[in-house]
Image (spheres, rainbow, N blue to C red):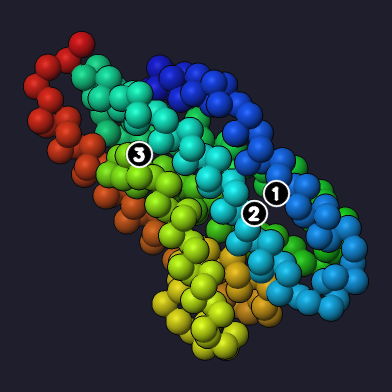
Amino acid sequence: MNNIVKSQLILCKKYWLSVMASVLIPIVLFVLLFGVPELIEENKNVLGVYGFTATLIVLIGVTFVISFGYMQRIQMYEIMAGKKPHQIILGRMCAFLPITLVFLVILTPFYWIWLPGMEHTLFLFWVICIRMTLVTIFLSPILKEATFGVPLSSIIIMFSYGSYGTESYSHSAFSWLGFGQCILLGEEITDTFIIKVICSGVIACVICYIIGHITLKKKIDLEPHQL
C-alpha cells in the first residue's frame, strides 16, 4: 500500500498549487468574513454559507488530483500490480484525507478566536468535511474522471435551499446530505441535528466504501494478468 500512497503523493506534489489553493482560499475567506464580528450578529446564516463554500473548495482541490490520477491510468496499473481493493481505497484515503485535515487544523484556532462558544458547530463541521472527503474518495473508482460530479452536485442542494423555508429544509431529504448539513450549520444546533450528522455520516461512508470496493473487485476479477 506504500507504493499506492507514494504514487498519489507524487500527483499532489505535481499539482501542489491546486492543493494549496484548496486549503488556503477557505482560510482567507474565513478571515475576511469573520474578522468582523458584527457580520455574524446581523446574519447568523453566514456561517452555514461559509461551511458550504469552504467544503466545496476543499473537495474541488481533492477531486482535481484524483481525476488526474485516473486520466493517467494509475488505477489500472495498481490493479495489474495485484493490489487488493481495500489497499487501493485506503491508499487514496491516506494520501488525500490529510488535505482536508490540514485545512481543518489551520481553521480551528481562527474559529476559537472569532467564534467562541460554538464548539459544537466546529465539531460538526469537522465531521461533515471528513465525511464528504471520504465519500469522494470511496466513490472515485466508479466515477473516475467524473469524480468532479460529487462536489459540483452541491449546486443543486444550494439552489434547493432557496425554495425551502428554514424549518422545512431541515426536515427535507437534503438535510441528510453533507452539503445540506453544511448549510444548516448556520441554524440552531440541536441534539437531534448532531445525531443526524454523525449517523448519516457513518452510513454514507460505509455505503460508499462498499460501492467502491465492489467496483474495484469486479475490475480486478476481469484482469487475469499481473505486472
Type of amino acid under label 1: Pro
Residue beneath the point at 51% across and 73% down = 159
Residue highlighted by disc 3: 145
Q: In the shown orientation, is residue 71 left or right of residue 111?
A: left
In depth, the one of 94 and 175 nearer the eye is: 175
**Chain-order first, disc 3 or disc 1:** 1
Residue highlighted by disc 1: 26
Whole-angstrom CA distance, mark 3 to mark 2, is: 22 Å
The residue lying furthest to the top in this view is 227
Q: Position of residue 208 (x, y in %)?
A: 34, 52
Query: Could you say which quadrant of the image residue 52 lies in?
Result: bottom right
Position of 201 relative to 162 (above/below)? above
**Chain-order first, disc 2 or disc 1:** 1
Query: Could you say which quadrant of the image residue 68 lies in?
Result: top left
Residue highlighted by disc 2: 54
Could one spot residue 198 in this view of the protein?
no
Q: Residues within 10 Å of mark 1 (few under 14, many from 20)?
A: many
